[in-house]
Image (cartoon, coloured by chain):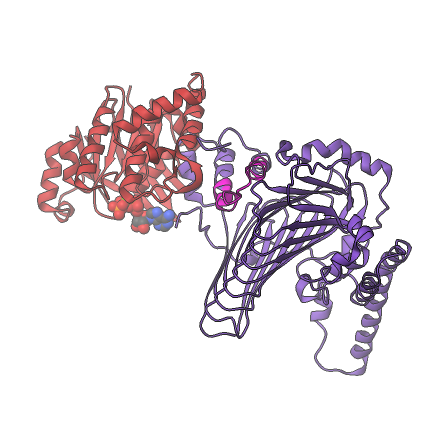
Amino acid sequence: MTMLEVRDLHANVQGREILKGLSLTVNPGEVHAIMGPNGSGKSTLAHVLAGRPGYEVTKGEVLYQGKDLLGLAPEQRAREGVFLAFQYPIEVPGVSNVYFLKAAANAIRKHRGLPELDAMDFLALCKEKAALVELPEELTRRAVNEGFSGGEKKRNEIFQMAVLDPALAILDETDSGLDIDALRIVAEGVNKLRTPQRAIILVTHYQRLLDYIVPDFVHVLADGRIATSGGKELAQELEAKGYAWLEKEPAPAGTR
Amino acid sequence: MSAVESPTPVPESAAPGSGRRSESDEAQRPEGRDSLPARAADDKEALREATRRDEVAPWLAALEAGRRRGEPEWLASLRDEASARFARLGFPSTRDEAWRQTSVAPLSRTRFDHATRGAIDDALDALPGFRFGGAFAGREAVFVNGRFMPELSSLGKLARVRVRSLRHTLQEDPDVLAGLIGAAADDEKHPFLALNAAAFQDGALVEVPERYAVRAPIHLLFISTGAVASHPRTLIGMNRGAQATIVESYVSPSGAHSFCNAVSEVLMGDGAVLDHVRVQSESGKAFHVATTAARLSRNASYTNHSLCLGAAIARHDLVVRLEGEGASTELNGLFASDDAQLHDTHSKIDHVAPHGTSRELYKGVLGGRSRGVKNGLIVVRPGAQKTDAQQASKNLLLSREALVHSTPQLLIHADDVKCKHGATTGQLDDVALFYLRSRGLDEAAARALLVWAFASDVVSKLKVAAVRESVERFLRERLGATGAVPGTPA
Ligand SMILES: Nc1ncnc2c1ncn2[C@@H]1O[C@H](COP(=O)(O)OP(=O)(O)OP(=O)(O)O)[C@@H](O)[C@H]1O
Ligand SMILES: [Mg+2]
């Protein structure tokens, strides 16, 4: 079954149309990279998929595992297996990371008919997943993102992804703000989370990330639409030529 | 700064009309003084005067009836003056600057009873729930409707600290108290302070000897019951170099229409250190008015944690005077109001001497149709050079009908000082809510978590674990929390 089917999606933010007829198909096991100029609507797409209130879909549809996604509240989407790693993760002072994640993980497990994890099992799970992105355990005990460096916040997002075990993960510029070593570590962590069942959408500006996490498809989002799509070599072309040349070519009818 | 820490500012007038006593008739009075409006103004003044007299009359009668014979001369005259002042001032109205946002009309119109046996039984029934799980056993003085209850108190572990009933002290050696009652709290303009001075029957006297440090916290528990008015008075004497932690808690069994008018005075000798905690969690129908006033000598350090959680109307005046060079104070406060509650705190930090430091952080969480008032005044007197004062007030509105007035004020009469103040009011951050929901938490749990996060820096400063845990429990219950709000962070 298709993981995600976006058809002719139009969406407004604050009354302004940002997504202007975007279509995209993602199958289980695939990694799709989405690139594109600043302000083209990449984060808007990510937030619409995760269900951000106030982002108004005016036209089009989104099917997730064959079912309508747009009618679901953000928490329902999360419980169904959608995960968004934020471009700008939020600080929640006074609430420890593991405590917050345990509540989240158990809400998801409950929805899936799985027994809730007790504190011991959960801590063991956290330890294992923190190791995956080499997140110091000390950070898992600290308040959610409070006082974390930019790179630590991004690592923490992938740590959360690992713990919550989504079917569809959307990573919004998880590479920005990471130093060279951290980028490699996080990319390796994401690669370990690549499974035949899981699909990943990577929003990025940099070819560098795609050297580590090799995508199956690369799409260029420009002015609210997919302007062009291709294989991993498209990213290299973009790196060399920038985005300006795109405007001269007509947008392809389909996306793949 | 995180999104939770700095809620999106909204205009303070975002909430609709406050339902306070109307002042519009006064505002509409024409400037010109022709005879008709002038006569109307005179009539209005006469009417106010009559109302004031009617309101104070039963209180004055009760004061007269409750008069103790055999009190020392100084106390009798202190009481005479205080009751004359109360009669003159009357209950405050919203025309008084200090009470502009807080109408005490529901209080001044209520008739209160004397304590009955039944009221005391109510207190006894509820008592176990007020003892913080026994955390203060051996260092706990219990007061019911303002009266010390030796049989309910347990004071076996105080060692060299003296905790006595004010009433017993007045009977046994009254002159110890001469010059101390009213030494920190100035009732010139404050009718409730004057009323307390005229009416107090009992209270706590705590004295920590010179250079003596008490590690375990001392608990003063004030229970109000029924429809009873009480005026407990607390006097804390921290001698030179003394150190202590003192928790005052004000409670009432649920449903009690009580009125507690409390005054606490704190005198801090050179280098004394006090961690002073105040938890007010009275019934949602109770009236609570209180003053905490502290005077600090050289290098004294006074920390006040004030948690205003209960009562229908609660007003707290917190006054700290830094009189000795190098004194420091930290005021840490949280109020959490809901339904139609009104929580009002007026703080005043008075820097009299040089090299003083003050830090104030007050947070308000307002739900329902509740009202909050936070007025914070910092005064720096002419001689108080090198003063370092910071004040922040942050409020979180959880409903459209809630309203908060927060007014920071600086009065600086010295030139070499560092003073900062700020006030913010906002709502829960939408993006933060979305972030938590995108992880699978439902909306209620996400909201609860963010409120928790907002209050966390104030709560985490509470060093007394039993108090901190009870405040956390309160927040969890108030927030109708699910598993999302942490008990103790892992
Ligand atoms: N909450 C908002 N209010 C108003 N405008 C918004 C909001 N969110 C996004 N926009 C606007 O929508 C457009 C697309 O923004 P979006 O964040 O999706 O871009 P992006 O492709 O992710 O850019 P970047 O590469 O810089 O992250 C921008 O013009 C942005 O200003
Ligand atoms: Mg973006």
Prevailing secondary structure class for the magenta stretch in the rendered image:
helix
Q: Is residue B451 left or right of residue B314?
A: left
Q: Nearer the viewer, residue B406 or A6?
A: B406
Q: Is residue B270 left or right of residue A173?
A: right
Q: Is residue B462 left or right of residue B284?
A: left
Q: Is residue B90 above or below residue B242?
A: below
**In which image quadrant can residue A216 be found?**
top left
Q: Position of residue B236 (x, y in %)?
A: 66, 53
Q: Which chain is purple?
A: B
Q: Position of residue B241 (x, y in %)?
A: 55, 54
What segment carries the magenta color?
A: B451-473
Whether residue A72 is visible: no
Q: Is residue B197 above or below residue B469?
A: below
Q: Position of residue A83 (x, y in %)?
A: 34, 30
Q: Nearer the viewer, residue B227 or B189?
A: B189
**In which image quadrant can residue A48 be found?**
top left
Q: Residue at x 8, y 44 (%)?
A: A240
Q: Colour of chain A?
A: red
